Amino acid sequence: MTKYVFVTGGVSSSLGKGLTASSLGRLLKSRALRVTMCKLDPYINVDPGTMNPFEHGEVFVTDDGGETDLDLGHYERFIDENLHRDSNATTGQIYSAVIAKERRGDYLGKTVQVIPHITDEIKERVRRLGAKEEVDVVITEVGGTVGDIEIVPFLEAIRQFRREVGRDNVCYIHLTYVPYLRTAGEQKTKPTQHSVTELRSRGIQPDVIVCRSEQPISDSLKRKISLLCDVPVEACVSAVDADPIYAIPVALHDEGLDDIVCRILRLDGPEHAIDISPWEGLLHRIAAATESVSIGVIGKYVNLPDAYLSVIEALRHAGFAHGVKVSVELVQAEEVTGMLAATLDHLDGVVIPGGFGERGIEGKIAAAGFAREHEIPCLGLCLGLHTMVVDFARNVAGMDGANTSEVDVRTPYPVIDLMDDQVDIANKGGTMRLGAQPARLRSGSQVFRLYGDEYASERHRHRFEVNPRFRSRLEEAGLACSGISVLDDRLVEFIELPTHPFWIGTQAHPEFKSRPDRAHPLFSGLVAAAIARARSRQPRLLELDLDFDAVH
């Protein structure tokens, strides 16, 4: 029977429920268990797709086109499983589904209420994952903090879950914060006690308490938490700040988190003995890196790094693959124009990420041009590809005033224009070109070499594309359209400059498919080129061998 783990949080938001849940998922997979994960979000938006990144960080896109919470990115990176739109359920989705059923008459005239109809819908979403995926364990993170009014239906739903599927099939993990008061010179457990009391008032007794803190939790504090919160001492787990985040699974394993969870769920047989040596090998490679490269991310949401979370992690993964430390420098696009050399020349590589709207667009175009002219390795993602095309059209192909019609509808050369199937769309949510789309790569191109295949499938999230009316003129000027959509043989998926060390753009978001132990080919290629640039400016390192082809 499928087992279920529910992860709740108390005291404060941003404690790391997603990372804790992801790390547990990694540990359970290391025990030869089949694992999937999901997130229950209390906001009323149907999904985060229409949210400003400053509100909710990046929107993570799944293969099947789901616009989901950024925690699903952590889930995929840690457990190395492709999730889908059903892996993220929001209050908006839950109520929409219940109201649709009521309108159809599914409830046979009954009064529709939070209990049982909303809670039943929540439980059904979780059960459906277990049945659909045919997994051993479903790990569900409940967004928000215990005590928030908006998560009460979710807590009630997971309370009912154990009664319905059996005590041995459910484990409740509660993440709390144990602060250190410098004036008192000690850690305080009172916030944890209050948080657990609040959870218990909702009918849920946690099986495991994970204590987030800046310093390890002493054995005496564990005993105190155990006594006052009614959990075994061994179920009080210390979770100290970790760098890199990929050290968290090993740290939690050393604390016995996976052992206690498996005992609770009756999954502690010899067939599920753990082997975390591959993950420890990854950490060893990370720690062994001595050389470093600097990569600039030219964005408009740089005041909130979570807006580019997957991009930053993909860059780090590429560094792991090449045995170097990647120093990510977030560069405000609006401040680039007019001070290009001072802002960009010291960098070993540049990423121009996705985004929407006019703000910062000229800075991104200028950055693409500076990287092109000064042979700085550059990778453009979605809007990043658009800015590279605009730069090339203006400054190489002789199209003065070229632009994207997203910014300037009166441009004489709309080299980037709205896709035909997007013209008549009024509703913004969930209507872009979304999810995995296949592309055919041009033989002999840089992207063909990086992927090592004629085809590539990447996740998309966009409305605008390279205007096919100008494609031939751009190619005649030297821009290679090196990847074209398979389904209609029309959409430009990849561009590159064959005469440049690495000047590649993709209409997709490849950052969503990168893994810590399997770097994405495009990011790996960028970092390889950045290493070459860094070494070319340090002659004493030239004798070190760089295998540029070792990118996937």
Image: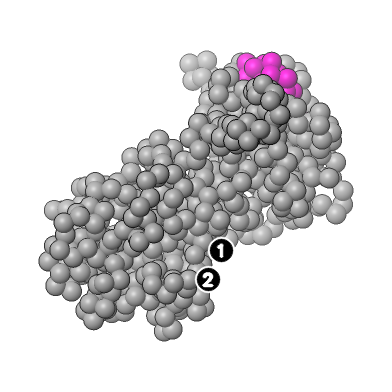
Scheme by which the image is coloured: one colour
In terms of depth relative to the viewer, which is nearer, 433 or 500?
A: 433
* Marks 2 and 1, the one that precedes in the sequence: 1
Residue 334 seen by the camera: yes
Name of the residue lying farthest toward the bottom? 444
Q: Residue at x 50, y 31 (%)?
A: 44
On screen, residue 296 above or below 257 = below
Residue 291 seen by the camera: no
8 lies left or right of 477:
right
Residue 491, position as x, y percentages in the image: 38, 69
Residue 479, position as x, y percentages in the image: 27, 76
* CB contact under 8 Å: marks 2 and 1: yes
In terms of depth relative to the viewer, which is nearer, 220 or 31?
A: 31
Residue 4 found in image quarter? top right
Q: Which mark is residue 203?
A: none
Start-end of magenta stretch: 193-208
Q: Amino acid at mark 1?
A: Arg
Instruction: Assess disc 2: are there few (<14), some (14-19) or many (≥20) residues with their C-alpha within 10 Å of its C-alpha.
Output: some
206 lies left or right of 530:
right
Determine the CA span between mark 2 and mark 1.
7 Å
| Screen quadrant of the N terminus | top right
Name of the residue lying farthest toward the right? 269
167 lies left or right of 111:
right
On screen, residue 394 above or below 23 = below
Q: Which residue is mark 1?
A: 518
Q: Which residue is mark 2?
A: 552
Q: Amino acid at mark 2?
A: His
Q: Residue at x 69, y 46 (%)?
A: 129
Residue 98, position as x, y percentages in the image: 62, 32
Q: Secondary structure at mark 1?
A: loop
Q: Residue at x 59, y 39 (%)?
A: 89
